[in-house]
Amino acid sequence: MKRKISLLVGIALVAMVLGGCGKSVSDDNTFKIGLEAGYAPFNWTQIDDSNGGVKIDGSSEYAGGYDVEIAKKIAEGLGKELVIVKTEWEGLIPALISGKIDAVMAGMSPTAERLESIDFSNNYYKSDLIMVVKKGGEYENATSIDDFKNAKITGQLSTFHYSVIDQIEGVNKQTAMDNFPAMRVALESGIIDGYVSERPEGISATSISDKFAMVEFDHGFETSDDDTAIAVGIVKGSELKEKINKILDGISEEEFKDIMDNAIKNQPAVE
């Protein structure tokens, strides 16, 4: 959902060159979205079209996940063909501003910082921050972030998950890691005591291995609505915003939940 923070490298320059785009970038019958295809259960890469996978543009691989399923509904509502453009996280907003893609659907939060460069649709997911720890370990029964004083804690690089670790007094903040599989390995080996994520990843980790436990807090991290929500990133002034919002408004909360539950169930066991 929502790695937050930077994504500003190159954005200002691209915006200066390409600013003023007020229309959808696609002039054809496609809806091109950018995502990493490596952030399960929101998006991932797979080898075929099982469980509704969509072929990645220019690749023999496919993308699946919550973002992809919501993107399908938006593309259908727009009357366009969905095209998946696999893009590194730091390159998503530059790709949007430059016109390579029509929208970012990659578990991205509509932060104030990002809103300076792009627009966002209404939210299509909201979650809570949790901690993934070792099952049977000293932190499994934690109820507050204060219980992690002196603990070795990390989060994903260039994400909001990593920045909130500073709210834990006396924490032993570790170097940020590239992805969740790397953090799971580090946790299992004892390099870290836990990592911050959102609830879908917590469910994923505990489903993949009985060596992990998910800590949900009575006293947790301080966040804003934007911190824990994800939305569709679009070019400022794009005609797509109103259309996408109308489509999202037509999806019930129960349907959003079912789509996420299915994404968690269908995600690859190992990325």
Image (tube, helix red, strand yellow):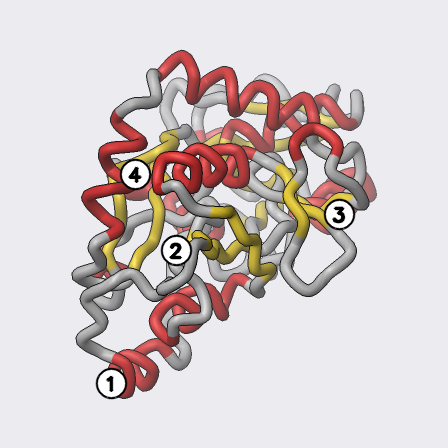
Amino acid residing under circle 3: Ala
Label 1 secondary element: helix
Mark 4 vs mark 3: which is more N-terminal? 3
Q: Which residue is mark 2?
A: 103
Mark 2 vs mark 4: which is more N-terminal? 2
* Mark 3 burial class by Cα count in 10 Å: few <14, some 14-19, many 20+: some
Q: Which mark is residue 16?
A: 1
Label 4 secondary element: loop
Q: Nearer the viewer, mark 3 or mark 1?
A: 1
Residue 49 falls in image quadrant: top right
Q: Which residue is mark 3?
A: 186
Residue 39 visible in the picture: yes
Q: Which residue is mark 4?
A: 223
Side of 39 where 257 appears, left or right: left
Q: Nearer the viewer, mark 1 or mark 2?
A: 2
Q: Nearer the viewer, mark 2 or mark 4?
A: 2
Amino acid residing under circle 1: Met
Mark 3 vs mark 1: which is more N-terminal? 1
* Nearer the observer, 141 or 176: 176
Q: CA distance from mark 1 to mark 2?
A: 19 Å
Point out residue 145 in the picture as x, y percentages from the top left corner.
44, 32
> From what the image shows, is residue 152 above or below residue 234?
above
Residue 221 falls in image quadrant: top left
